[in-house]
Amino acid sequence: MKVIAFAASNSSSSINKQLVTYAASQLEGINVEVLDLNDFELPLFSQDKENELGQPAFAHAFLKKVQSADALLISFAEHNGSYTAAYKNLFDWVSRIEPKVYQDKPVVLLSTSPGPGGAKNVLAAAEASMPFFGAEVKATLSVPSFYENFDAENGGIIHPHLNDKVVTTVQLLQQ
């Protein structure tokens, strides 16, 4: 089984990348590839830009990664209550190539933020919209107050109860 994991953020210090990397490490005996959205940077999508450029190679490369997976693990950063511009832009380009971006694959969605909201707004938006784009959402989990709940030095969840939730949630990809 192969899982593609990524944070829907292009921040070099993304807490969502830290979370998704940790969560992916909990999938034992699974081939996991953690992507960095910075490897798929594209110009701001518009029909004019699409007419000018066609479908960029990085959009095709990201779609190929999704197609190569048996399942997906995504952690959403929240910017002003919604998707990050980096994720939304990449998604817009890829959806022009293949409207079913997520290829009818099982998906687990995570989110985190520094505050107690845990990026729940963007997580809810993703959970509601992703099935229209070919995602079989198996589960969602918001991790609130990242810096209080995650040990960045050791790369793991501090509180056993929350850690159990993360492990149980991501293991749904193996079913």
Image (spheres, grey):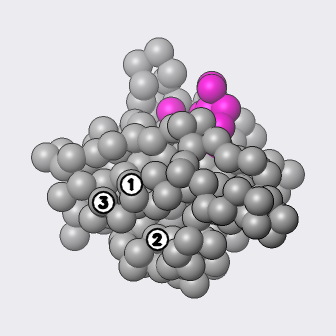
Viewer-nearest residue: 51 or 117: 51
Residue type, label 1? Lys
Q: Which mark is residue 65?
A: 1
Viewer-nearest residue: 151 or 102: 102
Where is 108 relative to 11, above or below? below
The answer to if 163 sits in the magenta stretch is no
Residue drawn 30% across the image and 39% down it: 25
- Mark 2–mark 3 contact, CB under 8 Å? no
Range of the magenta residues? Answer: 9-18
The location of residue 154, given as percent across then percent down, is 41, 19
Image position of 115 (left or right of 97): right
Image position of 53 (left or right of 166): right
Name, please, the residue furthest toward the bottom: 132
- Mark 3–mark 1 contact, CB under 8 Å? yes
Q: Quadrant of the N terminus?
A: bottom left
Residue type, label 3? Ser
Q: Which residue is mark 2?
A: 102
The answer to if 13 sits in the magenta stretch is yes
First in residue order: circle 1 vs circle 2? 1
Q: Which residue is mark 3?
A: 68
* Residue 139 position by quadrant: bottom left
First in residue order: circle 2 vs circle 3? 3
Q: Badge 3: few (under 14), some or many (20 or more) residues near its Cα, within 10 Å?
A: few
SS label for mark 2: loop
Residue type, label 2? Tyr
The location of residue 131, given as percent across then percent down, is 53, 81
Q: Badge 2: few (under 14), some or many (20 or more) residues near its Cα, within 10 Å?
A: many
